[in-house]
Amino acid sequence: MRNKMVLFEVVRTALTIAIALLLGYLILIFATDDPNTAFKWFIYGPISRLRRFVELLNRATPLIFTGLAVSIVFQAEIFNIGAEGQLFFGAVAATFAALYFPQIPFLHVIIVLIFAMAAGGLWAAVPAYMKAKWNASELVSSLMMNYVAFYLGLYIINYHMRDVNAGFLVSYKFPRTAWLPRLLRRYNLYPGIFIALGFAILVWFFLYRTKYGYELRMVGKNKEFARFSGIKVENVIIYSQIISGMVAGLAGAVEIMGLYKRFVWQMTPGYGFDGIIVALLARNNPLAVIPAAFLVAYMRTGALIMGRMTGIAPEIVMMLQAIIILLITAEAFLSFWKKRIIEKAAMEQEEKK
Amino acid sequence: MKKLLVVLLAVFVVMSFAQLKVALLINGTLGDKSFFDSAARGIKMAEKDLGIKATIIEMGYDQSAWRPTLEDIADQDYDVIIVGTWQMQEILEDVAPMYPEKKFIIFDTTVDYSKGDLDNVYSILYKQNEGSFLAGALAAMITTSGMEKTNPQPIIGFLGGMDIPVINDFLVGYIEGAKYINPNIKVIISYAGAFNDPAKGKELVLAQYRQGADISFNVAGETGIGLLEAAKEMDKWAIGVDSDQALIVEEKDPDMAWHIVTSMMKNVDLSIYRALKLTIEGKCPYGKAEALGIAEKGIGLADNKYYEKIVPKKFRDKIKEIEKLILEGKIKVDTAFGMPREKLDELRNSVRP
Amino acid sequence: MNELVHGILSPQFFYSILRVTTPILFAALAALLSDVAGSTNIGIEGMMLMSAFWGVMVSAWTGSAWIGLLAGVTSSVLLSLALAYFYLNLKTDLVLAGIAFNIFSSGATVFLLYLFTGDKGSSSSLKSYVLPKIDIPLIKDIPVVGDILSGHHVLTYIAFISVFVVQYFIYKTPLGLRLRAVGENPDAAQSVGISVKKIRYISMLLSGLMAGFGGAFLSMGYVSWFARDMTNGRGFIGLAAQALGGHSAFGSMWGSLLFGLAEAASYTLQAIRIPSEFTNMLPFIFTIIALAIYARSKLLQIKKIKEEEKKA
């Protein structure tokens, strides 16, 4: 029965994606005289050239981080949707460390990443503490923390680390020791994707092979039962969110160290909310986050390439993402089939008796 | 035989240039009625008159898409690729040397030619400080003229997109021009912090008008649409920017057009047209930066029916006189590029209300 | 400097507070109406955006701002109906569905804008219409007070009138009572014969109605065009304002006014170089502190009750 349930989830996900793509095609029919060409670029674009594939890898990188971050809190059944703020503030802290710490090769990068993780963790700690201590809704408080991160971060960048000679509101350029450098001469591939993959494995190990991970999942499954079996639920509520925030903090830092080499955001990049889609697609499994992030990045890259080649607004992909979230989270979608699997298993068990 | 070959070659060269393939990459969206729209207009003009084949690509405000798009377009068979603004500068400095066979044009900033291999890049700069000097002089005359919609206070407004050198170049000229007419002039300076937030632009300018300004200078791209709306709503004066904004809005909103005394035109359209024409003639100075001012028709106040009807003749004559003095070099307008921060602050504080 | 003080303490400044508060207040009332029935409507942001978009489009097509308003509000209500269907019939998690609807609206409005006008940024190439401003007789002639209270956009008045209507509705009508009953204890409500599903549908639709007004105000009064993502987080700010005010419409109003004050001040204070980032951040910090205090007092209350039970 367990295998059947896994199969069920896989089929359900595949069907969801197929429905979303079909809808995408239908929308394109209204949008253009030549939907086939547009759809071709959407589907085939990201693998049509090595350069476009590199673009896909770079887009998947932050999504893996935020997908992992959201998966951790969702596994504990906590609705901390503050990944957006955590990654933004992580990037601000990374900028601080990149600009003001001694430029020792390699070590500098590590320090910057640690700063980003600390900042992300700190940001997640506020709603976590409020939840554990006073049972305040983490949903609203984490949402508020996103805005505080945004405005405070912009204040710090624009008034204290801003490169006044630059032609835009950006920080000073990082010294070379704080870069995640380009790996290929002609292609803009940077090591971010490898760090992300490494963290996916780390998070998986934490969740499924450590005591803390076990306790976290127990609290997610049944809080009262977890408390009953001696787990300190309040501690779990706090550390799960802090660890999640640390991973989210990396998303921002890695992106700016690799792609821009300075702080460039005047708007939040939105990866935190994308992380929710990724985590849902992956059913909060850290290893499944990797293909899920690739899928979301693939759709987005495809839409952008389609936009480039045909002029159609790439925002079409946002509608498809929304449909994917809705169908995957809709319990009733394909529920008749799920019911049948469960009934069948029950009947088989009856027969065995 | 040799002669024939030369002729054939010449024909071939002409043919291939006749089909010059050009791409304009907008790092934002069209519809700002000023800066980017002007660039697009230049391309359309060139398409009509010069027989080029052109594509305009709106890359949106998500910066993660800009570099991949530029690389992707450079991979394709375009002959000339045009980008603009400082935000594209670092990317272009990185990408252009990889495509020595392609030509690149960047407007409103210059690449750093000392960084090496940029012989295939032509940079266009504008002496917006010269034109803004005229705008400042005009605003200073109008504010105390006793014309309709004015109050006796010598206060004028300035709405900048961001506190950055290219915008401050407008500001420096504007302040110096206003002081040239009235040494006691006060300037309320607001920065929106964004080029795509017209709602915020409107609020900032409403606040300026409340604080006693009766004319405000729009230097904020799409954000500046808010300034024009505020002028209409509070029945005050506006000075447009980049394009002849009165003519652009008159069809849709004649009432708004009657609030725009003139526009400080930064002729991005003409400069791009000129660059493409020179490219076809083989005379475009790639590998160099050019600064276009009043003399080169890169900059100037819009002389339209609104200007003639709204602004009294004696003011218009005075503007002509100042224009001549600038052309003759008798008035030297400072520039914000390379101006030390302290000096800029001193200048801004000298006109603080 | 004098002009500046004049700028802050001028009647026009207070006038502008009311204006920038309007969309936040609508969003807060939308949040309140769903929250009393126990459902957190994260999708307000998307509903407002949809309404802002259709308001502009339909007013441009028909030449009537009022038909535009109707279309905008209708689109928002339809969206809330769809959200309610996913939440109540298909058993989708409400928060995640709300997020999905926000993403959907953000993408769909830009895409439709591109389809209808060819622009991807804003509708500034369209001639759309705005709803009128209203001068209140008698009040408008009172010095200072008239300048602050009169001459507002019609939806600004509707927003503040709605505060009283919503408060009355929730606390003085049978339907409002049912809403609260479902919000406080859905099982108990079900057991006395109230259809929880039906009540939550109603509260969602009312929430969508308020969000619709808020969105229409943005594109048909606050400014006269639609721009991508023009709600700019106001739906979420509305949630915060409501969280500040608890289950009272007046509380929501004061919360909204706090955010409105911060926003209006940030525009004016910029002239003396007080960073707008700072002024904008403050209300969010207030909200977090208020949430903490509120949660703590509630927790203490529960503890106290439990202790008393023990004693007894």
Image (cartoon, rainbow, N blue to C red):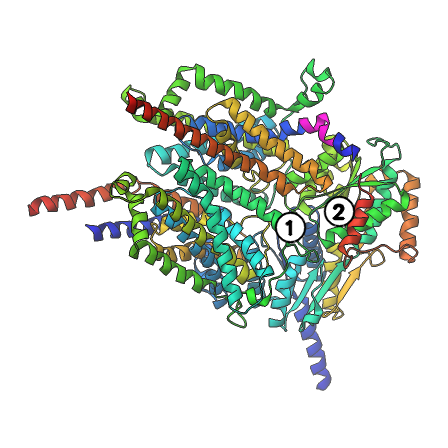
Using the image as rendered, state which of residue B242 and residue C168 is in the foreground.
C168
Instruction: Say above or below: B48 vs B185.
Output: below
The rendered magenta stretch, by its main secondary structure, is classed as helix
Label 1 with label 2: CB-CB less than 8 Å? no
Q: Position of residue A295 (x, y in %)?
A: 40, 56
Q: Residue furthest left?
A: A353
Q: Chain of mark 1?
A: A
Q: Is residue B70 left or right of residue B333?
A: left
Q: Residue furthest bottom?
A: B1
- Reply above or below: C293 against A94: above
Residue at 30% from the left image edge and 55% from the top image edge: A208
- Residue at 54% x, 34% y: name it: C286
| Quadrant into which the C terminus of chain B falls | top right
Q: Amino acid at mark 1?
A: Asn
**Which of the numbered marks, if any, corresponds to residue A158?**
1
In the rendered image, residue B199 lying in the magenta stretch gets the answer no
Counting other residues with Cα less than 10 Å from the Cα at mark 1, is it few (<14), some (14-19), or many (20 or more)? Answer: many
Residue at image mark 2: B241
Residue C53 place in picture, x, y as percent: 55, 37
